[in-house]
Image (cartoon, rainbow, N blue to C red):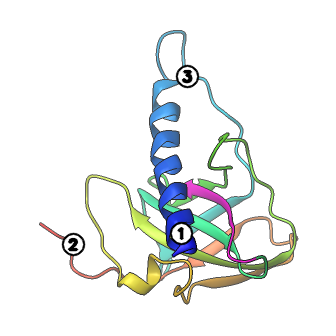
Amino acid sequence: MALLNRTKRALAKSCIAVLIIGGLNGCGGEKEIPGGTPGRIHIDGIPLREVQVTMYDSKAGGNVVGFGISDSEGRFELREPETLEGVWLPAGHYRFTLESVGEIYMQWPAKFTQADTSPLEIEWTGGEGRIELDVPEPTTPRG
């Protein structure tokens, strides 16, 4: 139950982060907060846009490490949920979850959206340059 509450809080903070980042594009030109570890999300090499990737440290009790929202090329940068500062991943084993956050709704089976059940994992050495996430195809979009 505590993990579910942490996940809900992390997702709520992520939604607030999206609103804050969007609000930074007001008068005076675009202001950008530097991101952290870069990544790319795709299905068999085809980029996925508007997907929130949330990373969890699988060896430290499943704590949220950071999140990123993919652009039209599937690129994202990891950020700290509360401050939006860039997160640079240390070497380690990570689990991640997926959530559709765009106009075109995509749905994955529930196990891909929960930190404690997600089979989506990576071993990060830090020397890869960017995270490459090849994910399963979502189920039929809700219309």
Q: Quadrant of the C terminus?
A: bottom left
Is residue 25 shown to the viewer in this render?
Answer: yes
Residue, far top: 28
**Is residue 65 or residue 8 the one in the foreground?**
8
Amino acid under disc 1: Ile
Are there few (<14), some (14-19), or many (20+) residues within 10 Å of tag 1? many
| Residue 30, label in figure | 3
Query: How far apart are the alpha carbons under marks 3 and 2?
Result: 32 Å
Q: Quadrant of residue 28?
A: top right
Please name the predominant secondary structure of the magenta segment in the image. strand
Per the image, label 3 sits on a secondary structure element best described as loop
Residue at image location 37% in from the left, 82% down from the top:
110
In the rendered view, would you say 137 is above or below 14? below
Magenta range is 61-69
**Is residue 141 or residue 113 the one in the foreground?**
113
**Is residue 31 or residue 11 the one in the foreground?**
11
For label 2, the residue is: 141
Q: Quadrant of residue 126?
A: bottom right
Residue at image location 59% in from the left, 75% down from the top:
96
Query: How far apart are the alpha carbons under marks 3 and 1?
Result: 25 Å
* In the displayed structure image, the side of residue 125 where residue 141 appears, left or right: left
Are there few (<14), some (14-19), or many (20+) residues within 10 Å of tag 3? few
**Is residue 30 or residue 4 the one in the foreground?**
4
Report the number of discs.
Answer: 3
Amino acid under disc 2: Pro
Is residue 47 shown to the viewer in this render?
Answer: no
Q: Position of residue 35 (x, y in %)?
A: 70, 45
Query: How far apart are the alpha carbons under marks 1 and 2?
Result: 18 Å
Mark 3 vs mark 2: which is more N-terminal?
Answer: 3
Mark 1 vs mark 2: which is more N-terminal?
Answer: 1
